[in-house]
Amino acid sequence: MTDWFLDCGRELPWRTDAPRDPYRVLVSELMLQQTQVATVIDYYQRWMVRFPDFATLAAASESDVLHAWQGLGYYSRARNLHAAARVVIDKMGGVFPQEIEQIRSLPGVGPYTAAAIATFAFDQPTPPVDGNIIRVTARLCDYRKPVDTAAGGHDLRSIAQQWQPSLEEGGAGMLNEALMELGALICTPRAPRCSACPVRLFCQVQEPETLPIKRPPPKTVELDEHCGWIVHQGRVLLEQQTGKRWRGMWKLPLLTEPHSGEPLAALRYPFTNHRVNLAVFPATTPLFLAENQQWIPLEQLETIAITAPHRRALNQLIAQQGLTTGSTLD
DNA sequence: AACCCGTGGAG
DNA sequence: TCTCCAAGGGT
């Protein structure tokens, strides 16, 4: 396994240091939660320039943190990472803990991420059971029961634990990285490349593409979202989200009253288990602004954190109306 | 346990 | 276009 990893493993920005810096591991693992490697690489490199260590991140403002995370999604990860840096600086004296229970106590760090930091940064025999290791393990053992249940998770963690070398032997970190890399490059969800697999002789799977077995996902729900396009003297009216979803991010102002006629722009975007039909209508300048609303000069749009769908809508509208922002938006 | 939280790549 | 789903965590 580790021989294969040394030959075929990818060189990724968060794998360049040895031993690994816990801060770099934490940032990369939070970014990689439910997010593909190809998407994370640019964000990670920009992040490390902007917030190179715990102290810099702890001292940053939330709006700066959200702006650096803009477009990655699952924004609570950014707030949790920010909070975790403040815990490390303020409550741990700037020293990152090696005990997995203490690592686990940091905001945004669950069972997977705690195990990942412990094994990658400190070479502890704590298998980080993510989607890759779930898939690799289920196939290697031909595990045909649902994996996304308490019992299934317990079984897989138990199996992966048995593969771990002791702390004294060492090498757990590389073994676990190799298992994850195997899931990413060879033992893929669809069309696995079994003929190139370094452990094919040990694999018991009958039909790899049928594993792992998961419960059916919730049905998608259709939603309509009507927003207003209000521009005045080179500034556009935006509002900052206050609820749970997209909290702290800027977007076009929501129209509460039903709107008829042709929208200026329309686009559809997926959101968790929803599919949202966003329509933007021309609207009139309100007499009073809500507390979370603000006029944003067009040339400042790239300096604030805007949700991905609303940024697409804004780009459409600006191009369509021949407006200029002084520079190119993301 | 079930539900919520974003986004973009790949087939 | 549509569906799946990717290095999960919080509640």
Image: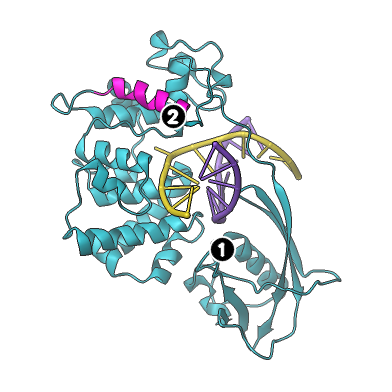
Chain colours: A cyan, B purple, C yellow
- Circle 1 or circle 2, nearest the eye: 2
What secondary structure is the magenta-colored segment mainly? helix
Nearer-the-camera pick, A177 or A288: A288
- Amino acid type at mark 2: Gly
| Chain of the residue under label 1 | A
Is A267 colored magenta in this rendering? no
Q: As drawn, is A101 to the left or to the right of A317?
A: left
Q: Are marks 1 and 2 on the same chain?
A: yes
Disc assigned to residue A330: none
Quick check: A255 above or below A286?
Answer: above
Quick check: A125 above or below A46?
Answer: above
| Chain of the residue under label 2 | A
Q: What's drawn in magenta, residue-wise?
A: A151-164
- Earlier-in-chain disc, 1 versus 2: 2
Q: Which residue is mark 2?
A: A153
**Residue C1 locus on image (x, y percent):** 76, 45
Q: Is residue A52 visible?
A: no
* Element assignment for label 2: helix
Q: Quadrant of the N terminus of chain A?
A: top left
* Element assignment for label 1: loop
Q: As drawn, is A314 to the left or to the right of A196?
A: right
| Disc 1 packing (10 Å; few <14; some 14–19; many ≥20) | many
Disc assigned to residue A307: 1
Q: Return the residue found at the far bottom.
A: A287
Q: As drawn, is A275 to the left or to the right of A327?
A: right
Nearer-the-camera pick, A163 or B8: A163
Q: Residue at x 45, y 57 (%)?
A: A76
Q: Is residue A215 visible?
A: yes
- Amino acid type at mark 1: Thr
Q: As drawn, is A235 to the left or to the right of A95?
A: right
Separation (CA) of disc 1 from disc 2: 34 Å
